[in-house]
Image (spheres, grey):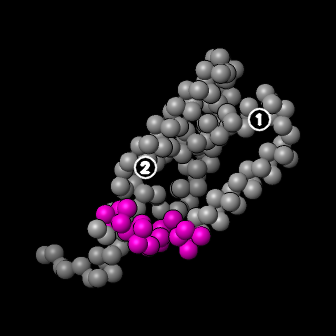
Amino acid sequence: MDTPLSAAQSVNRANNAIRKVPEITIYFWILKLLTTAMGETTSDYLVHVLDPIIVVVLGAICLAVALLLQFSVSRYVVWIYWLTVVMVAIFGTMVADVLHVELGIPYLVSTVFFSVALIVIFATWYASEKTLSIHSIDTRRVRYSTGLLS
């Protein structure tokens, strides 16, 4: 016999329904490590076997498609989420390789640049949402964009 859900269970079920990221567990970190390694090796393989310019353009297109898919869904869809993570890893490696190999930018310079970019993104996110949590963002704008507030 079904029992009525408590208020906390109802909220938890609603939060899981609109969640767009997986639970952060040891399995998440194992998959993240594997996708990062896969991104590195896939990028290196493709740019050495095919025309690097074509590969980078195709990588950008594939990343854009993955991001469009991820932003178009209203909940966590496993294959879309991990496709996006893999495409970020592949294209991110391509960008780093273009900076170092093609443009000759030293690792220290690109590291500082990407660190500053990350700080700016986190600062903007915090200024907008007053949190950096990926699980507990509960603002009027987020509720409106997820359909919880009309």
User: Left of 123 or right of it: where is 148?
Assistant: left
Q: Residue furthest left?
A: 1
Image quadrant assignment for residue 10: bottom left
Residue 90, given in percent of the width and then of the height, sits at 61, 36
The foreground one among 18 and 128 is: 128
Q: Is residue 46 a member of the stretch shown in magenta?
A: no
Taking the spot 55% from the left edge, 49% from the top edge, the residue there is 31
Taking the spot 39% from the left edge, 55% from the top edge, the residue there is 76
Give me the disc on residue 71. Answer: 2
149 w.r.t. 95: above or below: below
Q: What is the secondary structure assignment of the residue under circle 1?
A: helix
Q: Quadrant of the C terminus?
A: bottom left
Instruction: Using a 10 Å C-alpha cutoff, classify the residue at mark 2 as few (fewer than 14 neighbours), some (14 to 19) or many (20 or more).
Output: few
Q: Does any portion of residue 132 appear in the rendered image?
A: no
Q: Does any portion of residue 134 appear in the rendered image?
A: yes
Q: Earlier in the sequence, mark 1 or mark 2?
A: 2
Residue 69, given in percent of the width and then of the height, sits at 41, 43
Give the Cα distance between marks 1 and 2: 28 Å
Taking the spot 81% from the left edge, 52% from the top edge, the residue there is 112
Instruction: Using a 10 Å C-alpha cutoff, classify the residue at mark 1 as few (fewer than 14 neighbours), some (14 to 19) or many (20 or more).
Output: some
Q: How many marks?
A: 2
Taking the spot 65% from the left edge, 40% from the top edge, the residue there is 92
Q: Which residues are magenta?
A: 127-148
Residue 121, given in percent of the width and then of the height, sits at 64, 59
Residue picked out by circle 1: 99
- The kind of residue tagged 1 is Leu
Q: What is the secondary structure assignment of the residue under circle 2?
A: helix
